[in-house]
Structure formats: structure tokens, C-alpha cells
Image (cartoon, helix red, strand yellow):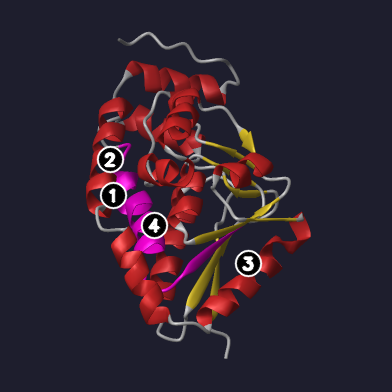
Amino acid sequence: MNAVATVTVQGPSLTTAAKNALRDELAAAAADSSVRAVVLTGTGKAFCVGQDLAEHAEALRRDPATAFATIHEHYNPIVTLLATMPKPVVAAINGTCVGAGLGFALACDLRVISATARFGTAFTGIGLACDSGLSAFLARAVGSARAAELLLLAEPFTAAQAVEWGIAGRLVDQDDVLPTALALAGRLAAGPTLAYAEVKRCSAAVWDQILAAEAAAQTRLGTSEDHRNAVEAFLAKKKPAFHAR
């Protein structure tokens, strides 16, 4: 019996179509009683690099007040499914993992990463606080001091650093990422899934509060001139300037 479902992020960046597909596929896997474990992976050289900023810039131009509706429609449901579905989820991080992509990876229960993968938080680089549970997941993985540095400075880091700091336990060659993740998920699928579900339930006890706080912060910052200018600068391949106090 194949009790492992593989869900692929249709990226590398998250358009509305990609977010809809990811949310719906995860919901289907969570509800399917024949699925006992899930593998989440990406395509090509990226696991997920976060929001498609061209699409986001257009949403900001239309109406900054509604540009962050995607948090409630997509990001929060996606990470809630990953963190709380009553079956284990293994992230097969095949490449670049940035922004919401890092949040997704950390919302999974276990991670297998490519030795060539690159990571980053990215949010403050465009004048935003983080979403996708990253504010809590990152501190839980690497400790509060390092998490603060990674979130505030938004500097990229390597796969080796990700393992050293506690983000992932398994570092493998690029070609071995998905096979290793599938083997690990198969092992979990044969295990005590009821016990796994209870472990996850306890770990996610304050989940709703964290996501609500992140969403409120994103909405407040989303109407700032700093954020709008930073997004436009990113798309123009220029360095953003921040002036708000």
C-alpha cells in the first residue's frame, strides 16, 4: 500500500494559482484516510522562494488595504495544515528556501535538505514582518538569539548552517533529497500515526495566536510607504531605502 502522498509547490514563487493549488492539495492529503504521511517538495532548483512580488506589487497598486487578504486565504491555511494535520509531513528541500518557503519548511515535522540549498528570511528586506509562522518556528528551531539575527538582518545562510543551527537533521546530495524524504515518510507511514497526531497537536497548541499576530503585523506594514517602495525597488533590481520611523 502506498500510504505516502507527495505534494509539490508549483513555484519557485507563489502566485495565487500556486497558493490555491498547494492549499487544496494539502487539504486533500490531510482528509484522505489512506494517506498516512506526506512529503512536501518543490520543483527545479527551488523549494519555494515565497510570494510572487510582481503579483504582490500589482495588488498593492490596486488597493494596499486588501493586498494582504492572501494571508488569511492562503498562507495561514497552508501552514496550519502542515503543522496540524494528524499525520507526519516531511519537507524535501530540493533548493532555495526563502521567506514563506522557510515558514512552510519549518511547519513540516521533519526536513531533508539538499547540500546546495540556500535559505533566508527575506521579509525585513522589503519592509515586512514575517508570516507563515516563521516568527515562532524559527526561534523554536535555532533559538531566540539566532532567530532574531536572521529575521532582523535577513542575511542568507547555507544548508550546512541550517543543519548546524537545528533547522534540519538530514543533509544529502541534490539527487537524494526526494528519495530520502520518501523513504523517511514511508517509515513514518508504517508507524503509530495516532501517536504522531497527538505529538503534533501538543506542539501546535498556541498556533492560532501566532498566526493572528503575524497577520495583523503584515497588514499594518503593508500600507506603509517603506514596504511599497521596497517592493518596487526589488522588482527594479535596486536597493530599497527605508525612511519611516
Q: Earlier in the sequence, mark 3 or mark 1?
A: 1
Q: Does 157 appear above or below 164?
A: above
Instruction: Name the residue type under label 3.
Output: Ala
| Label 1 to label 2: alpha-carbon separation | 8 Å
Name the side, left or right, on which 101 lies relative to 160: left
Please give the residue where the numbered disc 4 appears in the rendered image: 78
Q: Are marks 4 and 1 in contact (CB under 8 Å)?
A: no
The mark closer to the camera, 3 or 1, is: 3
Please give the residue where the numbered disc 2 appears in the rendered image: 215
Q: Does 197 appear above or below 236?
A: below
Is residue 31 something that shows in the picture? no
Please give the residue where the numbered disc 3 appears in the rendered image: 181
Q: Earlier in the sequence, mark 2 or mark 3?
A: 3
Residue nearest the viewer, comparing 49 with 115 = 115
Instruction: Name the residue type under label 1.
Output: His
Q: Does 93 appear above or below 65?
A: below
Instruction: Name the residue type under label 2.
Output: Ala
Instruction: Name the residue type under label 4.
Output: Ile
Q: Position of residue 85 (x, y in %)?
A: 37, 69
Say if the magenta span includes residue 42.
no
Q: How crowded is the residue under tag 4: few (<14 C-alpha within 10 Å), some, or many (20+)?
A: many
| Label 3 to label 1: alpha-carbon separation | 29 Å
Q: Are marks 1 and 2 in contact (CB under 8 Å)?
A: yes
The mark closer to the camera, 3 or 4, is: 3
| Label 3 to label 4: alpha-carbon separation | 20 Å
Q: In the rendered structure, find residue 72 and report the number of the disc placed on it.
A: 1
| Label 2 to label 4: alpha-carbon separation | 14 Å
